[in-house]
Amino acid sequence: MTLRIHDTLSREKVDFVAHDAGHVRIYVCGPTVYDYAHIGNARPVVVFDVLVRLLRRLYPKVTYVRNITDIDDKINNAARETGEDIRSITMRTTEAFHVDMAALGALPPDVEPRATEYIKEMQAMIEDLIAKGHAYEAEKHVLFNVPSMPQYGRLSRLDEREIIAGARVDVVPYKRDPQDFVLWKPSDAETPGWDSPWGRGRPGWHIECSVMSAKHLGDSFDIHGGGQDLIFPHHENEIAQSLSAQGSGTFAKYWMHNGYLMAEGKKMSKSLGNFYTVHDLLDEFPGEAIRLLLLKTHYRQPLDFTKGGLREAKTELDRFYGVLRSADDLGALGDDIPTGTVDALGDDLNTPLALSELHKIVSDMNKSGGDSKVAVKGQLLAAGGVLGLLQQNPEHWFRWQPKATGGGLGDEAIETLIAERRKARANKDFACADEIRDRLAADNVFLEDSTNTTTWRRG
Ligand SMILES: [Zn+2]
């Protein structure tokens, strides 16, 4: 299968051809760690998780690097506002990010470099850029000189005026050109800083990714990904730095960007009450439903994330897990992904089409009277493996309950009641059996009887 991807640089869907077919290398910009990840932060994590899962099916080796930005003025501001130590903020929020993304079924990257561990390498790249005439020191800052890079603006396709407006750059007197951007800036006594040839200071954001990608993937790698909002200035500046420092090499061969995310039809904002952190959503919905909702829209399209949509996604997963549960004792299976699913994903990661293929498989099974359950179970699990869905034990899925309703019946109490009901039925005490069923239903627990067993799920 030829993987086709939309490359932001050429604005076209192209055949993906790896630098080295034996080893695919991908870099995705990771979070700035100062607060819980919101659902907009989660979108690229889930999208590129599916891409990496697919690449792993197609190539013998994949190295996936996603950084942690643990030095940034947003972090410094959070520390100033709350009084919490900077390192404590970054460690705590990195940990929360890992927990939240794992709940969404995102596998950890192979390498997760933290910016503060690469300050020496950043200083070396900055010195190199100065030596090559692409950067200069001015009033304790080091700035990248944009006119020294003729291809600047190729990724974002912005002209000079739009660049100045878009970057909201301060037109400060020490800049040679208003487009020039910061590689290094001075730190005052209260702000984290490192000694450097230009005085005590800290790196700009863009230089981090140029350094960490080169360190772990080399000067030329295959795919660089991130949210659409990073195209300018972040990715444009990464290209300028990396290509100017290297002199040769391609930096990223392909650029992939996911579209914007809104919530409940509006731009997310704390004042509108539609600012959803993953952490909070997980109290109300299973992580897998959040993941499914993110994948129901093609990654390049804008996505309107709603709680109504989450409820629908949960119902869809109930349906899939219902099929898996009913085929649970039907033995082990191969891992052949249904052709329709793999073709859909190979066509620029068309997850909505891949998901509709799964629904089709289940509908066909229902039409054929359920004889093909084993095959369907195999196909659901194999396709789910690439999409990062349907991998939990169905019983576990049906027992999930929102945190808000805590205090409901625990699993053990439910099992005890079901055992009592079984006894009542054996004694033909159907009134008692029905009473237990109603009692459980009132607690949002629903029973399904088959010939020999009773399964249950939380509603
Ligand atoms: Zn980056």
Image (tube, helix red, strand yellow):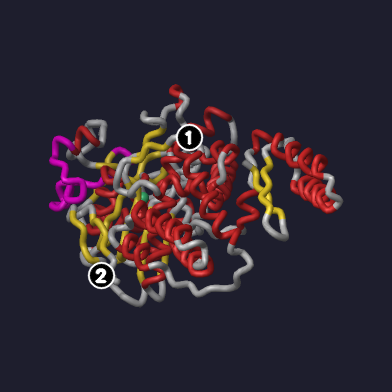
Beta carbon of the mark 2 residue lies under 8 A of ligand 1 = no
Taking the spot 74% from the left edge, 48% from the top edge, the residue there is 411
Q: Say which quarter of the image contains residue 302.
A: top left
Name the quadrant of the C terminus: top right
* Label 2 crowd (10 A; few <14 / some 14-19 / many >=20): some
Range of magenta residues: 139-162
| Viewer-side residue, 56 vs 116 | 56
Please, is residue 128 above or below residue 75 in the view? below
Residue tagged by mark 2?
17
Kind of residue sitting beneath label 2: Val
| Viewer-side residue, 109 vs 366 | 366
Residue tagged by mark 1?
307
Q: How far across and down, in percent of the image, does residue 225 sit?
A: 33, 54
204 vs 157, left or right, is right
Taking the spot 17% from the left edge, 39% from the top edge, the residue there is 177
Kind of residue sitting beneath label 1: Lys
- Element at badge 2? loop
Q: How far across and down, in percent of the image, does residue 137 sit?
A: 27, 45
